[in-house]
Image (cartoon, helix red, strand yellow):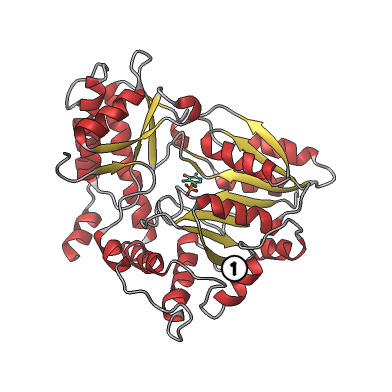
Amino acid sequence: MKTGIHHLYIPGPTNVPEAVRRAMNVTMQDHRAPDFPELTLGLFADLKQVFRTKAGEVMLFPGSGTAAWEAAITNTLSPGDRVLIARHGQFSTLWAQMAERLGLVVDIVDVAWGAGCPANEFARRLGADRKGEIRAVFVTHNETATGVTSDIRAVRRAIDECFHDAMLFVDGVSSIGSIDFRMDDWGVDVAIAGSQKGLMCPAGLGVLAVSPKALLASRTATMRRAYFEFDDMLKLNAEGYFPYTPPVPLLHGLRAGLDRLLDEGLDAVHARHRRLAEGVRKAVAAWGMDLVAEHRSLYSDTVTAIRVHPDVDAREVIRIGYDRYNTAFGAGLARLSGKVFRIGHLGDMNEGMCLTALAVAEMALAEAGARIDYGSGIAAAQRHYAATRTRTAELRIAAE
Ligand SMILES: *Cc1c(COP(=O)(O)O)cnc(C)c1O
């Protein structure tokens, strides 16, 4: 029997705060009742703040992030349309595969798993596309498989400098609500999130924010869609309703999750993620191990993918953490299996939780055969957390 709390350090689902869990414990209610919009209209408005969009529309589809990918594609594109995407991890690979399955012509740029989205190569391809055949550019903002955050602004610049008309789609499932994201400023046309990562809820909602340009494209796009039809959703959302039964308890959870994000303040949330992540990275450096991310400019503040030495099996590290220490780490996905384990540090997270992850990781690594000085990583993280406790953070905590 496993005792104590289960420690969850996967990049999603993330830890659900107690307030969110309690908010979901509701008696079932009529989703066509006159007071239902009191819940939903506020959700749409507050999600716009999280996506940092005033111009766009936000939609919540029952489903996960993958459903939101599908909704984005089927509503705005037509069979045979050309799209540009980089493959640099498991999530960008799956998104490209979905685009192919749905009948798009997919221009794939393969780069190393650990590299970011290659904005320069995108600029070259967009520049060469004299007839403007590329209808959309897909970017995975935070590649959760590799712990790499790409520069969306740079991709926007690549599109603009070619005077290209392509729409910009961004998968922000493991970034939005945790890492700085600016839909309007960055000229993002479709932004995608899911309820179970930075929004701190269980899985079950695919979240989309859609620009006026993408909405216009949806009027003429001919790809088949039914359940995910934007038009049906937006018509009813305008009055605070849904075209079908929404997962109402989850909407209450989202309300509580958004309250927490907005009470802390988005800038503070992003700074907290940066600081916690930096502590984890200091620990990995102290262990003498490498990140999958190839350069510090790419380091993700929501998930750290750690390469173990070749004589250690990362699957063992994860198994030991799970079986002996009631702790879940993220696996190395696809080609990274056995070589990499991941620590998810997003959502409802603090210093003590990160230090627990590092303490268990040190035990699991040592027991899987890695050479580890017990406490080396923990001490590096502690020193970082201690040195970066700012006066403003202290004042904020005192005020609470
Ligand atoms: C989690 C995730 C997804 C979506 O996964 P679902 O399991 O369908 O929610 C998509 N992209 C990225 C980058 C992710 O981290």
Query: Residue at label 1?
Result: 55
Q: Where does the image place residue 159, in percent across and percent down from the top left?
A: 69, 47
How far from the left and from the top, in percent, is residue 253? 35, 65
Indicate the quadrant where residue 192 lies.
bottom right
Q: Residue at x 53, y 34 (%)?
A: 89
Label 1 C-beta lies within 8 Å of the nearest ligand 1 atom? no
Q: Secondary structure at mark 1?
A: loop
Query: Residue 60: image x %, image y %?
Result: 51, 64
Residue 326: quarter of image? top left
Name which residue lies at 39% across and 53% down.
198
Q: Is residue 383 left or right of residue 270?
A: left
- State the count of labels: 1
Relative depth, front residue between 164 and 390: 164
Q: Residue at x 38, y 52 (%)?
A: 270
Judge from the rendering whether residue 393 lies leftward or rightward of residue 89; answer left or right. left
Q: Quadrant of the C terminus?
A: bottom left
Question: Residue at 20% of width from left, 31% of height from top?
Answer: 324
Is residue 132 shown left or right of residue 159?
Answer: right
On screen, 235 above or below 394? Answer: below
